[in-house]
């Protein structure tokens, strides 16, 4: 019963080569989130969508963009990956109500060569 | 920054012992949540405690919240080898209908030895 699915689980890209990570959900949740987690660090929120409403964190680099074509899918685009963008990228969802938990996918580990 | 600070950074115990992890934060919160992350995997929600609650239980987990000290603790009783994971606290700065906006602490790496 996969609920939040991330593909691929591992992604290798070259320095400066655009890459897209994908996330899908079967929970019909209104909110979808993208986090970046570097090795042995806390997950850091990049942005989130409430339905079609995009909310960017103030310190998210312009290099990172997102698309949400429908309720089920959300994409993370990294326009020109640098070595410092190597990390685990976590997608999460929530219903969009007050004081709620988030449901996380297994993550995509990105390696930049 | 609202980011929580956790201690200890790492904890190693024997199976059957209790494990206690602590989290501190800086400003007012709606709620505080604890998540577990197995190595190289996504996060799994454990428990949510609201700002007007002081203690909450779920199975072998006990969470306390002291808003006057801006701190929380997670107690795992009768630990098992399968509890080996990283544990993160997260403060919720959500503003209602926009969903929860979580800021995570740095985490505690728990190792339970058989």
Image (spheres, rainbow, N blue to C red):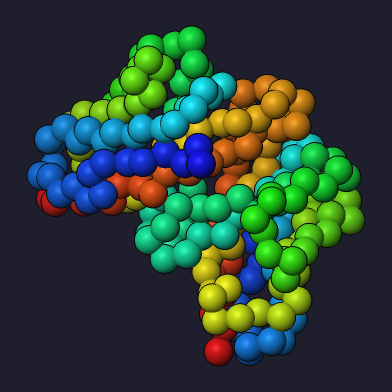
Instruction: Determine whether, in the image, residue A106 is placed left or right of residue A16.
Output: left
Which quadrant does the C terminus of chain A fall into?
bottom right
Question: x%, y% of residue B68?
Answer: 37, 15
Quarter residue A76 falls in: bottom right
Instruction: Determine whether, in the image, residue A2 is placed left or right of residue A49.
Output: left
Question: x%, y% of residue B92?
Answer: 56, 31
The one of A29 and A65 positioned closer to us in this rendering: A65
Question: x%, y% of residue A96?
Answer: 74, 31
The one of A18 and B78 positioned closer to us in this rendering: A18
Q: Residue at x 74, y 50 (%)?
A: A56
Instruction: Determine whether, in the image, residue B69 is placed left or right of residue B16.
Output: right
Total residue callouts: 0
The one of A85 and A19 positioned closer to us in this rendering: A85
Query: In this view of the protein, can residue A94 be seen by the observer?
Result: yes
Q: Residue at x 29, y 33 (%)?
A: B22
Question: x%, y% of residue B67?
Answer: 41, 17
The one of A100 and B103 positioned closer to us in this rendering: B103
Q: Residue at x 32, y 41 (%)?
A: B6
Q: Residue at x 67, y 43 (%)?
A: A93
Query: In this view of the protein, can residue B36 be seen by the observer?
Result: no
Q: On screen, B84 above or below A50?
A: below
Quarter residue B5 falls in: top left
């Amino acid at each position: 019963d996969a609920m939040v699915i991330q593909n691929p689980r591992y992604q290798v890209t070259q320095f400066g080569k655009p890459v897209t990570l994908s996330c899908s959900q079967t929970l019909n949740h209104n909110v979808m989130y993208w986090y970046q987690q570097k090795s042995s660090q806390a997950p850091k929120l990049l942005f989130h969508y409430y339905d079609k409403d995009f909310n960017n964190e103030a310190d998210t680099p312009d290099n990172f963009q997102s698309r949400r074509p429908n309720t089920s899918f959300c994409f993370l685009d990294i326009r020109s990956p640098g070595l410092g963008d190597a990390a685990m990228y976590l997608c999460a969802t929530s219903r969009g109500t007050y004081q709620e938990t988030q449901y996380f996918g297994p993550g995509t580990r990105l390696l930049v060569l | 920054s609202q980011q929580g600070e956790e201690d200890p950074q790492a904890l190693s115990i024997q199976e059957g012992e209790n494990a206690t992890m602590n989290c501190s934060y800086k400003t007012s919160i709606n709620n505080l949540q604890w998540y577990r992350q197995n190595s190289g995997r996504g996060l799994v929600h454990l428990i949510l405690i609201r700002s007007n609650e002081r203690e909450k239980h779920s199975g072998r987990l006990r969470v306390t919240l002291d808003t006057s000290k801006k701190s929380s603790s997670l107690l795992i009783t009768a630990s098992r080898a399968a509890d080996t994971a990283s544990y993160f606290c997260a403060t919720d700065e959500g503003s209602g209908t926009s969903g929860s906006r979580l800021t995570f602490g740095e985490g505690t790496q728990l190792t339970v030895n058989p």
